[in-house]
């Protein structure tokens, strides 16, 4: 009786699968739900056709190796959980061990078909080419404590002129820029700005860069500095985001060093600032009243303050 039931079960499964395949072309989400529902009800239908007298199962009919093993003792049987459809092994399992996981409907499959939608990341994009929101862009980066003014004085913020800019040949997100940072020195920067700022709006423009970060390689291309910018939510922007670079005041020149309001330019800078110091300083960079700030102090140059036109109050800078 067991083998007859199992054989009939297999035949019915094949019939349902063939019916589902015939309906699969051009199937809508509703059609898929209907097909899955038919498969879900197969066991119930079989039990009803058997008049409720289903022979006890000694093994799982879906186990491909069941026929190669000896049967368990007669008191060990398989009983299907009426709620979930899970095959319990009696007397060792009194109930389904995971009733919420084994649910006899199509909700689990429907959940797998739904796209994973991540919330918009509110973190700023690293203009050295990283994903918005830091590595991975998942918005879960551990909070970093804001650094001190002493930390700020270790970071070399300079005015730079973008003398050349082109799209990266191997990336639709990166730009390769050549910066003139004063005293005849140039730096190559790989910046993640391609989606947000046209090349024509960057070339021959003054920006603020970080000139003593550790050199990096992005998409196989060396990057020797970082262009500072602010990223923020903008419904009219790409992917609902916008990016604006910092704008030095009139009269600024490549090589001018940024200092904080009420302070002087440090006498010397380390050749390379540590990543930990930079992260603490970056955590304190914000837009206030249209100006770049570290904590409550504005970015200053000999000819005035550094602005970020169009950036909202409190937007981060990175």
Image: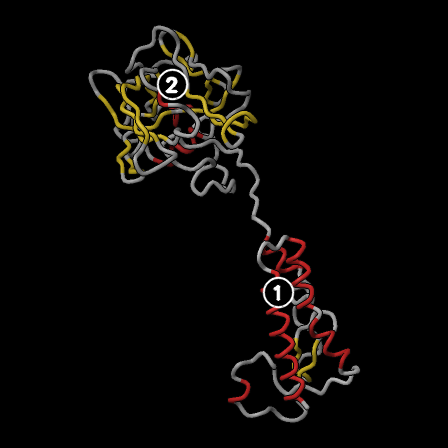
User: Foreground: 150 or 24?
Assistant: 24
Residue most extreme to the left: 184
For label 1, count other residues whose C-alpha is less than 10 Å away and answer few (under 14), some (14-19) or many (20+).
some
Kindly identify which residue carries mark 2: 201
Q: Quadrant of residue 118?
A: top right
Residue at x 45%, y 14% (from the top left corner): 307
Position of residue 277 in the picture relative to residue 88 (left or right)? left
Badge 1 element: helix
Mark 2 vs mark 1: in front: 1
Farthest-out residue, right? 51
Residue 219: which numbered mark, if any?
none
Q: How many labels does the image show?
A: 2
Q: Where is residue 246 in the image (x, y as percent from the top left)?
A: 41, 19
The image position of residue 80, as x and y in percent, is: 70, 77
Crowding near pointer 2: few (<14 within 10 Å), some, many (20+)?
few
Image vertical order of residue 33 relative to residue 44, above or below? above
Q: Position of residue 272 (x, y in %)?
A: 28, 31
Q: In this view, does 189 lie above or below 48?
A: above
**Element at badge 2?**
helix
Instruction: Specify how the rendered protein is coloured.
Output: secondary structure
Q: Is residue 314 above or below residue 85?
A: above
The residue that appears at 67% across and 58% down in the rendered structure is 33
Sequence-wise first label, 2 or 1: 1
Q: Residue at x 27, y 21 (%)?
A: 164
Q: Kindly report the distance in space between the C-alpha atoms of the residues bearing marks 2 and 1.
A: 55 Å
Quadrant into which the N terminus falls: bottom right
Q: Which of 105 and 91 is in front in this view?
A: 105
**Residue 186 placement: quadrant:** top left
Label 1: which residue?
Answer: 20
**Rendered position, 242 above or below 25:** above
């Amino acid at each position: 009786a067991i083998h007859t039931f199992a054989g009939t079960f297999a035949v019915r499964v094949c019939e349902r699968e063939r019916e589902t395949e015939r309906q699969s072309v051009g199937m809508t989400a509703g059609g898929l739900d209907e097909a899955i529902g038919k498969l879900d009800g197969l066991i119930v239908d079989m039990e009803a056709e058997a008049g409720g007298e289903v022979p006890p199962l000694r093994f799982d009919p879906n186990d491909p190796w069941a026929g190669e093993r000896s049967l368990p003792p007669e008191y060990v049987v398989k009983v299907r959980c009426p709620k979930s459809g899970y095959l319990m092994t009696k007397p060792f399992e009194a109930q389904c061990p995971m009733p919420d996981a084994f649910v006899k409907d199509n909700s689990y499959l429907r959940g797998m078909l739904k796209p994973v939608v991540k919330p918009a990341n509110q973190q700023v994009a690293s203009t050295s080419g990283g994903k918005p929101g830091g590595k991975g862009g998942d918005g879960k980066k551990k909070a970093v404590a804001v650094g001190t003014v002493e930390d700020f004085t270790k970071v070399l913020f300079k005015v730079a002129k973008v003398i050349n800019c082109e799209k990266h040949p191997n990336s639709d997100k990166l730009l390769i820029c050549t910066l003139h940072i004063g005293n005849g020195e140039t730096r190559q920067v790989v910046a993640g700005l391609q989606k947000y700022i046209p090349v024509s709006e960057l070339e021959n423009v003054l920006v603020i860069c970080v000139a003593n970060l550790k050199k990096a390689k992005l998409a196989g291309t060396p990057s020797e500095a970082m262009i500072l910018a602010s990223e923020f939510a903008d419904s009219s922007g790409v992917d609902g985001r916008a990016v604006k670079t910092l704008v030095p005041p009139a009269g600024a020149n490549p090589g001018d060093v940024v200092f904080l309001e009420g302070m002087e330019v440090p006498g010397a800078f380390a050749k390379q600032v540590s990543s930990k110091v930079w992260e603490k300083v970056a955590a304190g960079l914000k837009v206030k009243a249209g100006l770049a700030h570290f904590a409550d102090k504005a970015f200053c140059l000999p000819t005035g303050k550094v602005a970020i036109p169009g950036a909202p109050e409190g937007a981060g800078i990175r």
